[in-house]
């Protein structure tokens, strides 16, 4: 049979099936379906063999395949037939050669559409095919209609967790999803965001998604999530971000330096939405109490950076930071790394003088917990920020600060209970004055007594004071 005869038969068959009802097509598949498909594959080989351009003869073959996608039995067979998948992949390749961003070839979208339908029938077979992911990556750079179908295929493949490793192991697929997410085509954006939402549900690959190209997927998700709040793309992106912000195990964090570098970079971002995301991530991570020394240092570093880059009116962020510090301080193994981490005592001291009572109480409670560990006391007694905060709070007036002043007094008493700490406290200028000011102002006799007893522990060593002065001040 000559080439022209084969092409004519394909044209006639396409016209016949184009006019058939779904029931007739289903009956046809049961009678001759598999034989027909094999003959169409053979016809395809003939039409594409050689160097001359015969792409116009390919269209009816692809159209015939498309008529069978609504037949469930045919779908399963097509998805598992590597030769047929080869035809669809090659059809996209050939069509792509004659397609521009503004002019799309007649049959370019159809094979991509068929692939997207087949991914619903048997995603495992599709994701394992050597050419499908490659051609999807290539077609994502094409016309807007092609982008929509590529995004649909990736969304369908991502719906099965068993496909995730195959997807991510394909070179270029994450960049493809990121580009689709930023596409001007709404359907492509929505589907790409949905695919990332599905992938983010798999905790074993979250770190990879976050650290991809130093956070570029997160940046894209944030951009889409801040778009039209009523769009499905925006809600999918927001859900993906929420899942990515979930804390991970200490071992996973320790083993992934790229993730830690990416998160640390995000804390310095000029984009407030990126900082909002990374704050959630770090806070969630901080609430996982079982963490290694390196994880604890990393969390402290991030919390300090977030604190330093947050504007003073963001009380909710400072509240979360204070809660995270309190949680971390209650873990014995975390205490020394926290106290000795550069900037930690400065940050917790700033939180301790917040005008918001709960933030204040969280920070002071964390300091009390840390001070109960003798290994931390020397560092706290010699820290200027801690002692300056103590003096400021002791001199605060008003009933709103009563509890804070009492906690500070307990903190100093705790530090002064160790003999070797007393010279350090005595060297702090005006600390005795601040404590005397507090004992004079409080009407609580127990607090007065506790304050005087604490003063007597280290005041004789204090600069500018002698025992006579102290006794006179106390009597006054």
Image (cartoon, grey):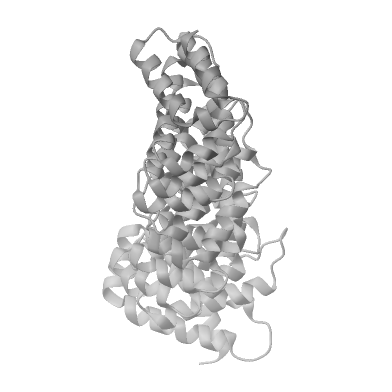
Rendered view: 24 above or below 54: above
User: Residue extending furthest front?
Assistant: 468
The spot of residue 468 in percent (x, y) is 53, 18
Q: Nearer the viewer, residue 419 or 81?
A: 419
Name the residue located 52 percent from the left edge and 76 percent from the top edge: 89
Q: Is residue 34 visible?
A: yes
Q: Quadrant of residue 453?
A: top left
Name the residue located 51 percent from the left edge and 68 percent from the top edge: 111
The spot of residue 177 in percent (x, y) is 55, 60
Rendered view: 220 above or below 175: above
Left or right of 178, for residue 362 = left
Q: Nearer the viewer, residue 459 or 184?
A: 459
Rendered view: 372 above or below 249: above
The spot of residue 264 in percent (x, y) is 58, 53
Q: Nearer the viewer, residue 287 or 292?
A: 292
The spot of residue 52 in percent (x, y) is 69, 87
Q: Nearer the viewer, residue 408 or 326?
A: 408
Q: Quadrant of residue 25?
A: bottom left
Q: Is residue 206 visible?
A: no
Q: Quadrant of residue 384?
A: top right
Name the residue located 52 percent from the left edge and 57 percent from the top edge: 210
């Amino acid at each position: 049979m000559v080439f022209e005869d084969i092409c004519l038969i394909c044209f006639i068959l396409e016209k016949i099936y184009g006019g058939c009802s779904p029931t007739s097509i289903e009956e046809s598949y049961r009678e001759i379906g598999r034989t027909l498909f094999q003959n169409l594959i053979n016809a395809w080989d003939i039409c594409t063999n050689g160097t001359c351009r015969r792409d116009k003869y390919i269209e009816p073959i692809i159209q015939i395949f498309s008529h069978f996608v609504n037949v469930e039995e045919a779908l399963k067979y097509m998805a598992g037939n590597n030769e047929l998948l080869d035809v669809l992949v090659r059809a996209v390749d050939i069509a792509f050669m004659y397609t521009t961003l503004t002019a799309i070839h007649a049959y370019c979208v159809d094979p991509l559409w068929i692939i997207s339908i087949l991914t619903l029938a048997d995603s495992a077979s599709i994701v394992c095919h050597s050419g499908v992911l490659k051609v999807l990556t290539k077609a994502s750079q094409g016309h807007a209609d092609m982008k929509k179908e590529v995004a649909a295929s990736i969304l369908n493949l991502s719906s099965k967790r068993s496909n995730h490793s195959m997807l991510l192991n394909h070179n270029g697929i994450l960049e493809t999803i990121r580009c689709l997410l930023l596409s001007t085509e709404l359907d492509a954006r929505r589907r790409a965001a949905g695919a990332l939402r599905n992938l983010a549900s798999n905790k074993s690959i979250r770190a990879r998604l976050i650290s991809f190209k130093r956070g570029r997927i997160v940046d894209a998700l944030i951009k889409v999530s801040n778009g039209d709040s009523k769009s499905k793309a925006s809600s999918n992106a927001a859900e993906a971000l929420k899942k990515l912000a979930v804390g991970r195990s200490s071992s996973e964090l320790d083993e992934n330096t790229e993730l830690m570098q990416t998160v640390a970079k995000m804390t310095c971002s000029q984009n407030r939405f990126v900082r909002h995301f990374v704050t959630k991530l770090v806070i969630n991570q901080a609430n996982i109490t079982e963490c290694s020394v390196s994880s604890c240092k990393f969390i402290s570093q991030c919390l300090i950076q977030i604190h330093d880059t947050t504007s003073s009116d963001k009380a909710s962020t400072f509240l979360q930071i204070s809660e995270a510090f309190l949680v971390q301080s209650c873990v014995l193994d975390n205490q020394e790394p926290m106290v000795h981490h550069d900037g930690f005592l400065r940050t917790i001291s700033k939180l301790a003088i917040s005008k918001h009572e709960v933030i204040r109480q969280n920070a002071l409670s964390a300091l009390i917990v840390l001070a109960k560990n003798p290994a931390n006391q020397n560092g706290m007694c010699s820290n200027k920020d801690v002692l300056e905060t103590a003096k400021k709070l002791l001199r605060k007036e008003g009933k709103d600060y009563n509890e804070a002043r009492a906690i500070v007094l307990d903190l100093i008493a705790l530090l002064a209970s160790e003999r070797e700490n007393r010279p350090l406290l005595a060297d702090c200028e005006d600390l005795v004055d601040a404590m005397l000011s507090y004992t004079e102002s409080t009407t609580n006799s127990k607090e007065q007594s506790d304050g005087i007893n604490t003063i007597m522990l280290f005041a004789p060593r204090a600069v500018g004071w002698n025992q006579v002065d102290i006794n006179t001040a106390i009597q006054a």
